[in-house]
Amino acid sequence: LQKPYEREELEREIVDIIVREAKLDRAQVTPDATLEALQLQSIDLVEVMMALEEKFGYFPMDSSIVEAKSLEQFVKAVASHIK
Amino acid sequence: VTLAAQVPNFDPTDCVPAALLPLSDRFAQFAIIAAEEALSQAGLPGDSPLGDRTAVILGTAIGCGSTLDQAHYDFYVLERRVHALTVPRVMPNSASSLLSIRYGCAGPSFTVSSACASATQAIGLGMWFIRQGVVDSAIVGGSEASITACSFRAWEALRVLTPDYCRPFSKGRNGMVLGEGAGIFMIESADTAHARGAYALAELAGYGTSSDAKDILRADVNGAAAAMKLALHDAEVAPQSIDYINAHGTGTVLNDSVEAEALRRVFGSSTMDISVSSTKPIHGHALGAAGALELAITVKALRQGIAPPTINWLEPDPGCELDIVPNVARPIQIRIAMSNSFAFGGVNATLVVRKAE
């Protein structure tokens, strides 16, 4: 995934999964939205992670994912694990 | 993930009375064995009933693990009938009820289920019952044996299990290790203990419990700090008097930083003067038994003057600035100690113990 457009495509897919699993309103989902503002609770994130794992295979939940504050940080942290 | 802290080669026929075997799940068997040890140490061999002034209050997070697993397998996969004693075995109160029956405790008996705070709440409630004069003594503690192949995968899916090493409060920590077991205590009012000439291991001095009222999984600084403050208040001790803290310290990224922050909030500038350790990498996270196992360790630490170590520790995490007793036990004077349990559901519970006079 060296090419930028592939990276963008991947990040878009991750956002799609988050929107679907956490039942978010697509209009609210901007990169700088905080997870708190999107009202993503721990259980939403667990379901998001399960769906991501089903699509992309297992990856570890490291501190960059756990401590992500904004949607963009979260998506980039997840994307960094996906080959 | 393939790592768990299980009781190896456990054969209940060796140590559980034959009459109780068909009635007991593994978690109740652990409780029966631990209770026998506790009562024998307390000088109460169980040959006469303890009567209606004794309660039994035990904690369990899940309760039966293997019995239900077996019943489901028999029914859904093998299409056989389920064992006729499945119901009494799967009751979460089976352990407390079996102890009540075995020792003739006719006072209140029940089970507290509040995930990883279960045992700590059970012990604290037992102390409050005694203080209020509801009973004179209580068998308290917790028991857990919920590691089955299926439940293990469920924990793994929550992404809280470490694939390699549980290293609480350390940089590079990546999760907890599931454990199992039971810890049982015989607690009595001072008068009751004196009257029968009992030898006290420690004084259970205070209990505090609070709820985050926020998120079902994510721990909260305010809730954790509140439980510790309430326990200190209940024990009528100042934060500076605490010499050792057995932390909840699961080894997950989030729990440990939240607990460290809560400790700083309660202990302020004296935080770094207190030896704090998590013993979970040694015995595993025994969920509803965790608080009982860790209180037993805390009492032992108090009696022997040794702060047990936080093993597998690598290097400081700036988010967990504590004196964490890294890797090697430390001899210290301990007069008053604290043990923390924080649970999914946002339940927080803390016990304070003091050296027996």
Image (cartoon, grey):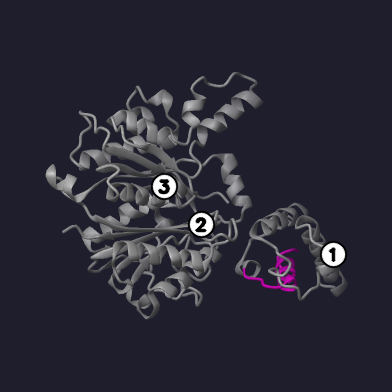
Q: Amino acid at mark 2?
A: Met
Protein chain holding label 3 = B
Q: Position of residue B347 (x, y in %)?
A: 49, 56
Observer-nearest of B4 and B288: B288
- Which residue corresponds to mark 1? A26
Q: Amino acid at mark 1?
A: Arg
Q: Secondary structure at mark 2?
A: loop
Q: Quadrant of residue A72?
A: bottom right
- Which residue corresponds to mark 3? B289
Q: Quadrant of residue B206?
A: bottom left
Q: Which residues are magenta?
A: A67-83
Q: Quadrant of residue B100?
A: top left
Q: Nearer the viewer, mark 1 or mark 3?
A: 1
Q: Is residue B310 magenta?
A: no
Residue at screen point 45% across, 62% down: B249
Measure the alpha-carbon separation of dots 1 and 2: 35 Å
Q: Nearer the viewer, mark 2 or mark 3?
A: 3
B325 to B19, vertically: above or below: below
Residue at screen point 37% across, 68% down: B276
Mark 3 crowd level (few <14, some 14–19, many ≥20, 10 Å Cα): many
Return the residue found at the far right: A5
Q: Residue B312: in sight, yes or no?
A: no
Dot 2 or dot 3: first in sequence order is 2
- Which residue corresponds to mark 2? B176
